[in-house]
Image (cartoon, rainbow, N blue to C red):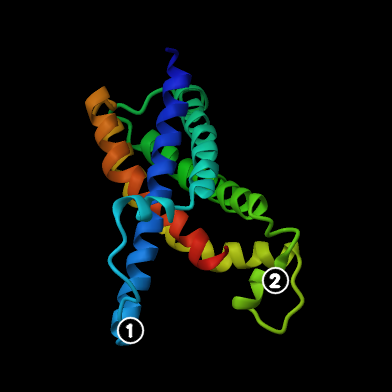
């Protein structure tokens, strides 16, 4: 199996699991809000099969598709683009700082904008913009207003969170690179929660 295929599958897994975690968090938050209001469960506790049927599988499928593309994009950046620009990161403070800033001011915002626009588009947000009434009622909505909302309200938190992922990554690159075991650790402990943050932001602040 080629490296690009592996990275594509890894990216798909990260976004797919992240979407599932975001759905679980939203369901838990809604349940906690009902309990806080004193509402009682109308029926017996749902079974595992019933809970599985409540999962938004279409959303997970879209996240899998985007994650596969994002995995390929990130792999190309780290193995083609960045090495051509900076040559090496090992023991080079200036190159690591430059690479981190390039990541955080170009590549990461591009991933976030692409994800939020992709998910909004496949859910019909650009053809039916009524969902924006929940954020800006009594206003006329168009594509520009969606993009303004995306940049002003949706992107900032995931972008801030991403520093906690990529800064440690570049620190590790300074000390000699990322091994296979460490790469798996980074994906499972850092990228999956970040993907969950993105998916939750999409659901809570867009649609």
Q: Residue at x 51, y 28 (%)?
A: 72
Tag 2 or tag 1, which sits nearer the N-term? Answer: 1
Residue at screen point 33% across, 87% down: 37
- Which residue is label 2 attached to? 130
Q: Is residue 162 visible?
A: no
Left or right of residue 139, residue 15 in this image: left
For mark 2, give the secondary structure: helix
Rendering coords of residue 146 (x, y %)? 67, 65
Q: Which mark is residue 167?
A: none
Q: 38 and 193: which one is in front? A: 38
Residue at 29%, 84% in the rendered image: 36
Residue 106 horizontal side relative to residue 129, left or right:
left
- In the rendering, at what x and y percent does residue 90 appear? 30, 26
In this rendering, position of residue 104 left or right of residue 130: left
- Please identify the quadrant where the N terminus is shown: top left
* Residue appearing at x 57%, y 46% in the figure: 110
Q: Residues within 10 Å of mark 1 (few under 14, many from 20)?
A: few
Mark 1 or mark 2, whichever is nearer to me: 1
Locate residue 142, reporting x and y percent: 76, 67
Quarter holding the C terminus is: bottom right
* Residue at the extreme top of the image, as rendered: 1
Task: Depth check: give the residue in front, 90 or 128.
Answer: 128
148 relative to 52 in the view: left or right: right
Residue 186 appearing in the image: yes
Helix, strand or loop at label 1? It is: loop
State the mark number for residue 39: 1
View extreme (front): residue: 43
Q: Is residue 133 above or below residue 143?
A: below
Distance between the Cα atoms at labels 1 and 2?
29 Å
Q: Position of residue 140 (x, y in %)?
A: 77, 76
């Amino acid at each position: 199996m080629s490296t690009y295929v592996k990275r594509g599958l890894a990216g798909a897994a990260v976004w797919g699991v992240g979407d599932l975690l975001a759905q679980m968090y939203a369901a838990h938050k809604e349940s906690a809000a009902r309990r806080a209001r004193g509402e009682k469960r109308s029926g017996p506790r749902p079974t595992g099969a019933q809970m599985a049927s409540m999962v938004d599988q279409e959303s997970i499928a879209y996240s899998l598709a985007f994650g596969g593309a994002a995995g390929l994009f990130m792999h190309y950046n780290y193995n083609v683009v960045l090495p051509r620009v900076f040559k090496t990161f090992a023991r080079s403070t200036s190159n690591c700082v430059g690479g981190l800033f390039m990541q955080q001011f170009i590549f990461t915002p591009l991933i976030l904008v692409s994800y939020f626009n992709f998910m909004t588009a496949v859910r019909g947000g650009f053809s039916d913009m009524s969902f924006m009434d929940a954020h800006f009622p009594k206003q006329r909505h168009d594509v520009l207003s969606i993009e303004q909302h995306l940049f002003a309200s949706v992107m900032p938190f995931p972008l801030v969170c991403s520093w906690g992922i990529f800064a440690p990554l570049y620190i590790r690159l300074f000390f000699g690179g990322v091994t296979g075991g460490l790469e798996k650790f980074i994906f499972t402990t850092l990228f999956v929660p970040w993907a969950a943050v993105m998916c939750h932001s999409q659901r809570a602040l867009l649609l």
